[in-house]
Amino acid sequence: MEALTENDLKRYNRQIIMPGFGEAGQRKLKNSKVFVAGAGGLGSPVSVYLAVAGIGHIKMVDHDVIELSNLNRQILHWDMNIGKKKAESAHEKLSKINPDIDIEAIYKTISADNVDELVGNADVIVDAMDNFPTRYILNDSAIKKKIPFVHGAIWGMEGRATTIIPGKTACLRCIFPEAPKPEVFPVFGAAPGLIGCLQVIEVIKYLSGIGNLLTNKLLIFDGLTSEISQMYLQRNANCKYCGHL
């Protein structure tokens, strides 16, 4: 395991002093690999806060190009980046936010044919997508590789998050057996900001071994009422995707 440097100890001091975390927790983050699917509304805060937390290797995959309509929520991308690949923009910003970590950004569409290769030997998959077909593909890869899958989604001022541990919790297909109809949905930028931060906290808790994860619980945030609730989930023993685990 790669050791912490003097620079690491200074940069991450305020999280190292967290009770139960310490230098051991920071070393775990430094030696971890996180796969982030999507560099948009959720992927922006997810990748930024993973980077500043000191995750040693962040791999992002996105197939889109930046448009003006993205900029109310996709904080990694700015006016000067319009027309540029989101993966390139993300790599440029994240490398400057924390030059001490390894950033890999790939311009590619995630598919059932390439997902396992793209995820590689990642320790965690973070779902920062905006469609269920791709989320299901990521879920299936997480099950195959038996690695955690941190799901997040938003709609308007609402959002939800859960952490899936293959073989121990309900998988995404247990929770949502059918995908909702595709739509152009409303988004206020602060909603993916909040949900993305929750996803990062889940990743850090899992990698460092502190706290309690959102396992078999779906956290639901309603920005219109400022209420946060949790829905308890149950694994489907007959799920044809994860039931065999």
Image (tube, rainbow, N blue to C red):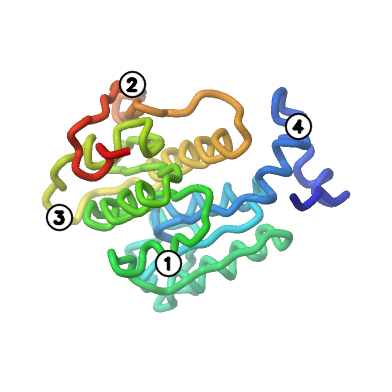
- Residue 94 rendering spot, x and y as whole percentages: 60, 62
Q: Amino acid at mark 2?
A: Ser
Q: Amino acid at mark 1?
A: Glu
| CA separation in Å, label 4 and label 1 | 33 Å
**Left or right of residue 98: residue 207:** left
Q: Which residue is mark 4?
A: 22
Residue at x 24% of width, y 45% of height: 241
| CA separation in Å, label 2 and label 3 | 26 Å
| CA separation in Å, label 4 and label 3 | 44 Å
| CA separation in Å, label 2 and label 4 | 30 Å
Say which mark, if any, is on residue 182.
Answer: 3
Q: Earlier in the sequence, mark 2 or mark 4?
A: 4
Q: Earlier in the sequence, mark 4 or mark 1?
A: 4
Say which mark, if any, is on residue 229.
Answer: 2
- Residue 206 rendering spot, x and y as whole percentages: 54, 36
For mark 4, does the 10 Å Cα neighbourhood hold few (<14), some (14 to 19), or many (20 or more) residues?
A: some
| Secondary structure found at label 2 | strand
Q: Mark 4 near mark 1, Cβ–Cβ under 8 Å? A: no
- Residue 58 rendering spot, x and y as whole percentages: 57, 58
Q: Earlier in the sequence, mark 2 or mark 3?
A: 3
Camera-near label (4 vs 3) is 4
Q: Amino acid at mark 3?
A: Pro
Q: Which residue is mark 1?
A: 117
| Secondary structure found at label 3 | loop
Residue at x 33% of width, y 66% of height: 110
Q: Earlier in the sequence, mark 3 or mark 1?
A: 1
Residue 115 lies, with reference to residue 56, above or below; the image says below
| Secondary structure found at label 4 | helix
- Residue 169 rendering spot, x and y as whole percentages: 35, 31
Camera-near label (2 vs 4) is 4
Q: Mark 2 near mark 1, Cβ–Cβ under 8 Å? A: no
